[in-house]
Amino acid sequence: MRKAAIKRKTRETDVGVEIDLDGTGASTIATGIGFFDHMLDLLARHSRIDMNVQAKGDLHIDHHHTTEDVGIALGQALKQALGDMKGITRYASVHMPMDEALTRVALDISGRPFLVFKAEFSRDKVGTFDTELVREWFQAFAINAGITLHVETLYGSNDHHIAESCFKGLAHPTRFVFVRDGFHFWAFLLAPLWMLRHRMWLEFIAHLLLTGGITFALARLGIAGSAGLWVALLLALLVGMEASSLRRWKLSRRGFGNVGLVVGDDRETAERRFFDGWVARDHDDRPGPPPALPSPFSRPPSSDIVGLFPQPGARS
C-alpha cells in the first residue's frame, strides 16, 4: 500500500500528516485556518488521496508558518508514499476551470524539485487567509515532494476561484492511466493474479467460474486430464492477448474515457509525445482534453500506448 505518515515539529508549528495514495478522497483536515482547510479538502477529494492533516501553529502571529509547514509535510509524505516511483506516469497537465477562472497545471514527477507559479490576486486576503500564501504552500509542497510543478492562472477575477482552481488543478493531473496495447506476458502467465492486481473483480470471478466449469464438464465427459490443461492454457493465452482491452473496459466502467492514441517505442517516449501535443494546444487558449496524436513514425511501431482520462465526476 502506498501510504505515508510525517510528523513535523518546530518552534512555531506541530504538524502531523497521513496519506494513502490509493484511497477514495476521504479527508480529516484541521489546521485552524478555515479557507486553507477548504483547499486541502478539495485537494484530497479530487485527487482521491485519503488525507489526514492535523496542525497547530502560531496563528496569533499569522498563517505563514502553519501553511508552509503543512506544505512541507504533505510534500514529504507524497515523496515517501511514491517510494522508488516505479510504475507511475511522470508527466501530466490539466486546464482547471472554476467559474470565470481558468488555471493550467503541469507537472513532472521527476525527483527534480522546481516551481513556476503565475497567479495574480486582486486582494490581500480571502477571509482571513493571506492570498500570497497560496504560492508559499505550492513552493513548500513541490520542493519537498521532489516534483517539477507549473501553475499558471490564465484568467480570473475572483480570488477564491483562482486559488481553488490552483488546488483542484494539482489534484486532477494524477488521475490518468496509460494502457499498452499488444500481448501482455504477465497476464498470460499469471492471469488470476494479474486481474486481482488491477482490481478486475468481475473478470476474476468470471475466469474462475469459466475455468472450473470447463474442467468439471470435461471430467463428466470422461475426457483425459491433459485436455483440461490445454483449455487452461488457451484461456490464459486469450487473457494475455486481450489484456489491454480488459483494462480499457474496466477503466471505462470507472468513468475513464479514451482520449487518444500515441505511438512510441517505449512508455516514456509515448508519454512525452502525448503531453507535448496537449501542451501545444495552449496556443489557442481553449480548455479541454488533448487530441489524438498522429504517428510520428513512417515505419510500423513496436508498441502502442492509449491514454485514458477520467470523465467529470468519475470514480477513481
Image (spheres, helix red, strand yellow):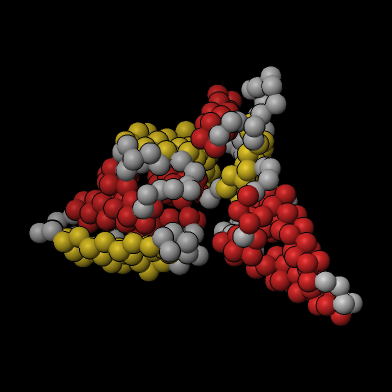
Q: In this view of the protein, can residue 129 be seen by the observer?
A: no
Q: Nearer the viewer, residue 115 or 265?
A: 265
- Quarter holding residue 207: bottom right
Q: Quadrant of the C terminus?
A: bottom right
Residue at 66% in and 55% down? 188
Residue at 67% in and 67% down? 204
Residue at 16% in and 61% down? 9
- Quarter holding residue 265: top right
- Quarter holding residue 213: bottom right
Residue lying at the far left in this picture: please name it: 11
Residue at 37% in and 57% down? 81
Q: Nearer the viewer, residue 282 or 304?
A: 304
Q: Quadrant of the N terminus?
A: bottom left
Residue 60 is left or right of residue 260, and the answer is: left
Residue 312 is left or right of residue 161, and the answer is: right
Q: Nearer the viewer, residue 257 or 247?
A: 247
- Is the residue 232 above or below the residue 182 in the image? below
- Is the residue 81 above or below the residue 302 in the image? below
Q: Nearer the viewer, residue 300 or 248?
A: 300
Position of residue 232 measured from the top left corner of the image (x, y, whole percent):
74, 64
Residue 23 is left or right of residue 218, and the answer is: left
Position of residue 138 measured from the top left corner of the image (x, y, whole percent):
32, 45
Position of residue 313 measured from the top left corner of the image (x, y, whole percent):
61, 57
- Is the residue 199 above or below the residue 267 in the image? below
Q: In this view of the protein, can residue 238 be seen by the observer?
A: yes
Residue lying at the far top in this picture: please name it: 298
Position of residue 163 measured from the top left corner of the image (x, y, whole percent):
40, 47
Q: How many marks?
A: 0
Residue lying at the far right in this picture: please name it: 221
